[in-house]
Image: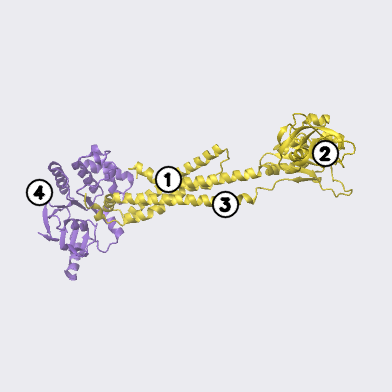
Chain colours: A yellow, B purple
Amino acid sequence: MAARPTRLILTTLGTVLGIAALVATVGLGQTASGQITQRFDLAAATRVVVQPEEKGGQEGEAATQLPWDAPDRIQRLNGVDAAGTVSTLDVGDDLVRSVAALDGQKDGHALKVMAGSAGLFDAVRAVLRTGRFFDAGHDRRADKVVVLGKHAASRLGVNRVDSQPAVFIGDEPYTVIGILDSVSGRAELNDAVIMPNGTAKTAYDLESPDAVEIRTQVGAAQLIAGQAPIAIQPNDPSTLNVDAPPKQGAVRKGVESDLNALFLLLGAVALLVGGLGIANVTLLSVLERISEIGLRRALGAARRHVAIQFLVESVIVGFLGGLLGTAVGVLLTVGVSWVRDWTPILDNRLAFGSPLLGAFIGLVAGTYPAWKASAIQPITALRGT
Amino acid sequence: MSERSETWMSETAVALPAPVVEMIGVRRFFPGPPEVQAIREVDLTIGQGEYLSIVGPSGSGKSTLLHLLGLLDNPTGGVYRLDGVDTMSLRERRRAVLRGERIGFVFQSFHLLDHRTVLENVALSMVYVGVPRRERMARARVALQRVGLAHRMDFAPTTLSGGERQRVAIARALVAEPSLLLADEPTGNLDSANAEAILEVFDELHHEGMTLAVITHDDHVSSRAQRQVRIVDGTLQW
């Protein structure tokens, strides 16, 4: 075996490829399905919403009021990326239109009017199509500015903000400073005209925010869900309702097992080929070493000694192939993940079990050649040159 | 040969110093068709310390006889006792052990492992006898000194001359301290000078008390032995 390093390498090649295919496909399968679920879940998995206990108390009112500084309190928690309040305004019969109403004119759009703190947009992952979000300054000064959701903007016929267009809510003009392209989680913002809290307080006597939208770091949602009520309402946290994402769901498991079944099948086929390769080369090596086998038998080796010798060799070849293949497979998984900017995920059991699988394949593949070798009669072996 | 005389002989074997080899009516037929009667009715006794040559033309059955003597093959019939042990009733595993312990082989084509050093080749013959590795190496060194190859221990066999290789093979055969040294055409692949050196090694071994059986077609090689038997058509002629 050691006498023919080139052949040793070529022999292990089949197993190397097989194990590498197995490790890489399973590794990439796990990595990819990890990424898919991560992408599906990212927005949902990091969203926490806090709102007061449903109305239905003694006076038919909300059990408690959220404080205006709730986002600041939340922001102090470790694991929070952004937080902001959101409220739906009661605008009565006020319609929204993009040109000033003439006397008695009643056309216009019954759009939802909402209010938020400056942090709201970040908290709901809002993306701007054009313009800008309002900030804490607008809020403090109660500036009459609004940001339009994308559907609201198209209904109002507003698609540019560089000319500082105005929309009218009732008879009051507001300057449009930005148009949203997308939000996640709170989809109603797409249909709404959104103004700063300060403006809403002045114009519509908003008393308290309806809810606090929180965007957490990945994996922190459960923790924040537990801490948020206490941070906002230390005296009576139980009066607050918290919406948090469930634990990693069963959907992901299903996707993984589907992918892995296919990948495992591919790896198994590659391994079969690798095993046949070992069997083939071991058989060749038995034929080449007939005289050595004969000599060993003459020196007192029993049939089992000869069989064990070849079995050990094929197991070592299989193990080496498994070891190399695992290394190649892990490198492939990490390499592809690096290029695709994924987080590589690989089961430890796979990494440690694969070399053993290689050894097992060597054992199975070596059985027939070993039996063949042990059946060689020493006299045939020693005859001739 | 009758059962009665067999019994008589085994009884005497207890009384007298047992011969190394005792073959009575040994046959070896290879099933055909056509059936080949390679060895028919061979009676052969080799006493301790004897130097015997078995000479015969090719096809006479001498290789088959060597294989039978060396426990590499089973007789079709007859009795073969090696060191007083009846080998006919032994199972394969036990025969392998007996072969490793009691018989040293020297082949025409040396049969050295090319990828092992000379020392390792010699030590190999003690692996299956169960000698610990350290002792194997020590004994292999002594054996190589005995055949005059102490300076070649770490060489690969491929770098040695034919005569040197055969001396390595002899060292390998001797190192496990066998009862019988079996040589099959030991000089067949050697020039006359090297052949002479090998025959001198055999003479020395004979003087040291080793039991040797040399199988050859060469009358010159045969003449060096203490006793010659000729094999023709599967039977021995004295």
- Classify mark 4: helix, strand or loop: helix
Q: In x, y percent, where is residue B156?
A: 27, 40
Q: Between marks 4 and 3, how big is the CA–CA gap?
A: 79 Å
Quarter of the picture holding the N terminus of chain A: top left
* Protein chain holding label 1: A
Q: The residue under label 1 is which amino acid type?
A: Gly
Closest to the camera, between mark 4 and mark 3, is 3
The residue pinned by badge 1 equals A321
The residue pinned by badge 4 equals B220
Q: Between marks 4 and 1, how big is the CA–CA gap?
A: 55 Å
**Which of the two labelled residues, at mark 3 and mark 2, occupies the earlier sequence position?**
2
Closest to the camera, between mark 2 and mark 1, is 2
User: In this rendering, do the residues under marks 3 and 1 share a single chain?
Assistant: yes
- Classify mark 3: helix, strand or loop: helix
Q: The residue under label 4 is which amino acid type?
A: His
- Left or right: residue A40 versus residue B169 is right
Q: In x, y percent, where is residue A329?
A: 49, 43
Q: Are marks 2 and 4 in contact (CB under 8 Å)?
A: no
- The residue nearer to you, when weighing B152 against A155, is A155
- The crowding category of the residue bearing disc 1, from other C-alpha atoms within 10 Å (few below 14, some 14 to 19, many at least 20), is many
**Residue A137 makes an appearance in the image:** yes
The residue pinned by badge 2 equals A96
- The crowding category of the residue bearing disc 2, from other C-alpha atoms within 10 Å (few below 14, some 14 to 19, many at least 20), is many
Q: The residue under label 2 is which amino acid type?
A: Val
Q: Between marks 3 and 1, how big is the CA–CA gap?
A: 27 Å
